[in-house]
Amino acid sequence: MKNALDTQRIRQALRQKRMNATDLAREVGVSRQALYRLLKPGFRPLPQSVVKVARVLELEPWEMLLPGEDAEGQMAFKKLVGKAKNGNARAFELMPAYLSRDPNIGWSYAEEADPTTHLLLAAAAAVANALWPGREIEAAVSFHSTRAGNGPAFMFGSKFMPPELVVERTPVPMRRQNVFGVFDLDDFRRHLEWN
């Protein structure tokens, strides 16, 4: 089963690009009716449609998908974690939203993950717990923190910004997990505006 599109995220991207649905339909090469069907909540689009819309909106395809409650959702989350491990800050931004929607999605890493993966999962869970408390995420924070151990810290950042400035601008829940990056809590919150 395919994941549905995060229509709020797409509408936000349209606003940022000062586009409307007609503009997007023209750029993607589909009729307005086809685009409205694609943006209808719950509609599960074909992958090539997602890629076309993503290109026009200058987003990654995975940024436009809602997490699934099935194996496909697990795979999408694993891809996000992999991208975050490679330093992709935009992928990390989405992880707390996934964890807040499905606190159990990170448990699939119980046995196979390395300390860096657990470190990133602990930080994402800490952010999710700070922004959307009461979603049974606290257990994930401690689970992944314990497995991360006392390994090295992880830093998302620009080579043009001094590390001490990156640390200073890191939200407290991330800092407590030794994951650093210039994020604002609104960066995370915007992925789950409907809550």
Image (cartoon, grey):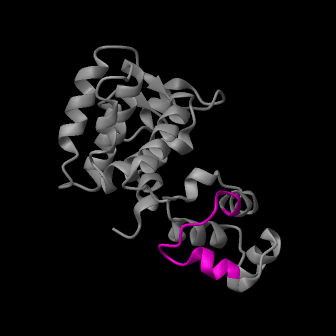
The residue lying furthest to the front in this view is: 1
Q: Is residue 100 above or below residue 141?
A: below
Work out whether residue 182 can be spotted.
no
Residue 13 lies left or right of residue 132; in this view the side is right
Q: Which residues are magenta?
A: 34-49
Rendered image quadrant of residue 120: top left
* 155 relative to 110 in the view: left or right: right
Which quarter of the figure is the C terminus placed in? bottom left
Q: Residue furthest top?
A: 151
What residue is at 54 percent from the left and 67 percent from the top?
A: 44
Q: Is residue 87 left or right of residue 159?
A: left
Residue at coordinates 66% horizontally, 55% vertically from top-left? 59
Q: Quadrant of residue 157?
A: top right
Q: Is residue 63 shown above or below 81? A: below
Measuring 41% from the left and 26% from the top, which residue is drawn there? 117
Return the residue nearer the eye: 40 or 46: 46
Question: What residue do we see at 47% from left, 73% from top?
Answer: 42
Give the image location of residue 16, x and y in percent. Answer: 65, 67
Residue 113 lies in quadrant: top left
Q: Is residue 38 shown in magenta? A: yes
Q: Residue furthest bottom?
A: 33
Residue 70 versus residue 14 in the image, above or below: above
Q: Residue 43 in the image: state x and y as whole percent.
A: 53, 72
